[in-house]
Image: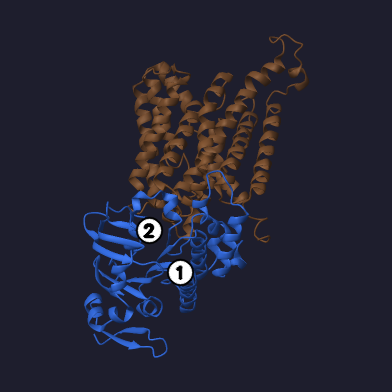
Amino acid sequence: MSTKTQTSSSLMETRNLTFAYGVEPVIREISLNFQAGEFTGVIGPNGSGKSTLLKLIGGILPSSPETVFFKNRELSHYRKKELAVSIAWIPQEKQMAFSFKVIDIVLMGRHPYLSPLSFEGENDYRIAEDAMKQTQVLEFAHRSFNEISGGEKQRVMIASAISQKPEVMLLDEPTSALDIKYQIEILNILRQLNERENKSLILAMHDLHLASKFCKRLVLLKEGRVFCEGPPSEVLKKEILEEVYEVKVKIFQDDEDGSLLVVPGQS
Amino acid sequence: MNELQPSTMSSRKFALGIGLFFLLFLATLVLAPLIGPTSIDIGKALSGGLDAADNVDADILFLARIPRILLGAITGAALSVTGAVFQALLRNDLAAPFTLGVSSGASLGAVIAISLNLNFVILGISTLSIAAFAGALGTMFLVFGLVKTRHGDFPTSILLLAGVTANFFFASMVMFIHYLSDFTQSFQIVRWLMGGLDITDYQTVWSICPFVILGIGGLIYLSRDLNLISAGVQSAMSRGVDVVRTQKIGFILASLITGTVVAISGPIGFVGLIVPHIVRLLVGPDLRLLIPGSMFFGASFLILCDTVGRTLIAPAEIPVGVITAMLGGPFFVWLLKRQHKRGNI
């Protein structure tokens, strides 16, 4: 993996990225490369900077000059709509202040393609419909977003991002508030997007087992720094996790798919 | 494809919705002048045969009722659109020019202008309007600057407290200025603070039209960006909305139209809270419909409130601000309770 990183030019890159909300930096000197078609999980303890890193890469938070690049061009050099058709950032599902319908939310993904005062056309509806089929939310297209379940909301958010037709999708803890059934459902949708449409995915996750099961590459953060990165088998090691999470762990391997299960060991 | 189209936002649904609101507005505009404490003979008023001095019916219709109704329409439209836009920008349905203290900021501006005898006209714009606009804009930046968190959120409880504080503070400033002013100014200030739509010249109406039209037009132009912001600031950024620019322009245009109408009509509360709510219940939260809908519905609403005020205890009149406050107070409590139930406060 590391040799590939050096030979091909990267899709996204951070160079010595540091960020602070106030005085204390929450992201410290992070340099990372992301290739096209990668499925990356960003893991780490609470407060390690996972969500913030994603927001910086997605242009949601302002980054300092010469630190975040998409296709070797600095993020701030893109026009907003230009960036939106390349990178979609998907927040954790939550209640909205106003009761938009599911279809309205999905169509919002078409915003970067529309000029002011214009309405969504037939093409936009077709794209939205396809996205909703893909995430299995078409049946409640006309329900209020605030009335559907958490797992359904997350799938609607993903459908909205799909209709944005980006190359990169950044997802902030897409499964953390959900039951296991919905977690698997959503990660399978994401895996399909990655494998069939070659979308690059970067997920902030805290479930280490799911991260090892679905992600091809993991980035482990501790206190705003990259502690280590690589394929799940190289990152999810006993001595690494014990140092980062400051707890004794045991690691079991699933014989079927080789995914790793991390459980607390004796304290 | 076909199952999606009909019940969602399309240009046809948009045209239908706006058309219905426009018809309501038209009906109010035609019927309201016929209602009043004095019954008038509309045929006689419209017959051009009589000398103006003799045609009492025409005098009442054209000099008393119509300018007042036009001012009511513009004021109602402006305050309602502002309310709808504030609610979207702050993602909070308790936001309105009055609840956020923006109206009182405008009032303070106007009262300062009166007390300094700055009541004259530059380039067709009264200094009162300019002062009210400055007051509205200043309050807006003050309140939002105080409330905005580093994540770009505006927590409901703090927002409301900031609005209440601004209201109290500006009210005490107004009282202070009032206390210091001489008799003539004092009378002017009181008269202005009572609010009301009782003007008798068309000049005033035409002079505020361009600003309100410009402001509402600009906000309609921004309506899809505002839509996305109302669904979430960071999502809006990710979908290509220039959030900071849209917020700035939105707040400035909203201050412009609030200041413009408050300078003429005085502080009229709660219109900007009630109207967007009713329209949202009817057509949903999409601002492409909500803004024009609130414009027409708000115009009708304030004309109706004022008609009630003119006729209820005739020949005496109830100021329109009293009517809207009597409706708006309980309405606000109901909204507050609903937000509390949802766990927002």
Q: Position of residue B306 (x, y in %)?
A: 60, 32
Q: Position of residue B150 (x, y in %)?
A: 32, 52
Q: Position of residue B24 (x, y in %)?
A: 68, 38
Question: What is the chain letter for disc 2?
Answer: A
Q: Is residue A208 left or right of residue B61?
A: left
Asked if residue A140 lies left or right of residue A184, the reply is right
Snapshot quadrant of residue A125: bottom right
- Residue A21 vs B175, above or below: the answer is below
- Residue A134's image quarter? bottom right
- Secondary structure under badge 2? loop
Where the N terminus of chain B falls, by quadrant? bottom right
Alpha-carbon distance for marks 2 and 1?
Answer: 18 Å
Q: Between residues B136 and A81, which one lies in front from this camera angle?
A: A81
Q: Which chain is brown?
A: B
Q: Is residue B10 visible?
A: yes
Instruction: Tell me what residue is drawn at x 75 percent, y 22 percent.
Output: B42
**Which numbered disc covers residue A58?**
2
Q: Secondary structure at mark 1?
A: loop
Callout 1: chain = A
Q: Which chain is blue?
A: A
Residue type of the residue flagged with mark 2: Gly
Residue at the spot x=35%, y=24% of the render?
B179
Q: Earlier in the sequence, mark 2 or mark 1?
A: 2
Q: Amino acid at mark 1?
A: Asn
In the rendered image, the quadrant that contains the C terminus of chain B is: bottom left
Viewer-nearest residue: A62 or A85 = A85
Between B339 and B172, the residue placed more toward the observer is B339
The circle drawn on residue A198 is: 1
Residue A68 screen position, x and y as percent: 31, 57
Mark number displayed over residue A56: none
Are marks 2 and 1 in one subunit?
yes
